[in-house]
Image (cartoon, grey):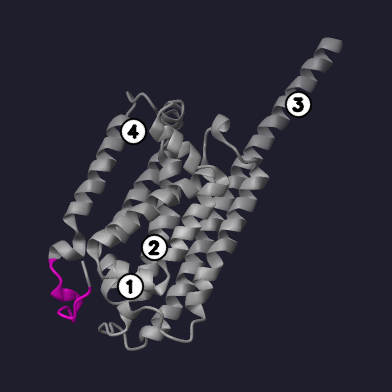
Amino acid sequence: MGHTMAHEKISDFSFYSLYRPDIFMLILMVGILYYKFYGSRTSNFQTTKLQKFFFTAGLVFLYVAKGSPLNVIGHHYLFSVHMVEMAVSYLAVPPLMILGMPHGFYRKWFSRQNKLMNTISFLTKPLIAILLFITLFSIYHMPVIFDAVMANGLLALISHTILLLTAFTMWWPVLCPIEELNTLSDLQKVGYVFASGVLLTPACALIMFANDLLYATYAHVPELYSFLPPMEDQMTGGIVMKILQEVVYGFVLGHIFYKWVKRERAKDKEDLALIKMSAANNS
């Protein structure tokens, strides 16, 4: 959907545009299939309550970002809201959904040798994964690219789909729950997260500290709030993206450290058990 000055108020948009029942039904169907195949006691792959919570939260956030009035406001009125949508879609949703899938699912699919899985395995290699997403994310926010995408509905759909898919590949190296599929140590995962944050910073800084309005898309849109004219809205967008990025990265780092400590404690218990067993045998 391109921009149009016919919509001076949000209430001018149709119910379909504001709440996207097609996206809601698609996400609902994904949720139903998830609980049918992975959420019941008879499922081949069992999921924990925490995994169900993560996956459900990911679906809810995806709808809020792509199917709720947030999308309309971000697309037609406020760049800062669009950046909230971007942060939720590509920084929050993929980690939640990756953590929400049962481990058996990953073992089954990554054990297959075909073109699709070979391509996924290639794209999830740490260096390729991080550089691909960061590069595409940065290119997307170049003014000439951004304005072209926002003016063309099909181009926007293609661009956002690619960004979502590459966001999943970007998060996989640090959130992979299967030991045999892990290519990074815990310390390397921490470095990976910090590197991702550093590489995203220039795009946010360019937006935050620009002296001019970067995006023609928001140059003449109706102002929803008098205290947030286009320049302030643009600066706020960069700040919001950086803050939400740090929040998500903090969550991911917390998850990494939790798994790290849990693994070390398990090793300590094993070592202690071996020591006790050795002492008992020697006595």
* Image quadrant in which the C terminus is located: top right
User: Mark 2 to mark 3: distance in Å?
Assistant: 48 Å
| Residue identified by numbered label 2 | 86
Q: Specify whether residue 64 is painted magenta.
A: no
Amino acid type, mark 1: Asp
Mark with earlier residue (2, 4)? 4
| Residue identified by numbered label 4 | 39
User: Mark 4 to mark 1: distance in Å?
Assistant: 42 Å
Image-based side of 56 in relation to 96, left or right: left
Mark with earlier residue (2, 1)? 2
Amino acid type, mark 2: Met
Mark with earlier residue (1, 3)? 1
User: Mark 1 to mark 3: distance in Å?
Assistant: 61 Å
State the residue at coordinates (80%, 22%): 275
State the residue at coordinates (49%, 53%): 132
Part of the protein shown in magenta: 3-14
In the image, 29 versus 265, the foreground residue is: 29
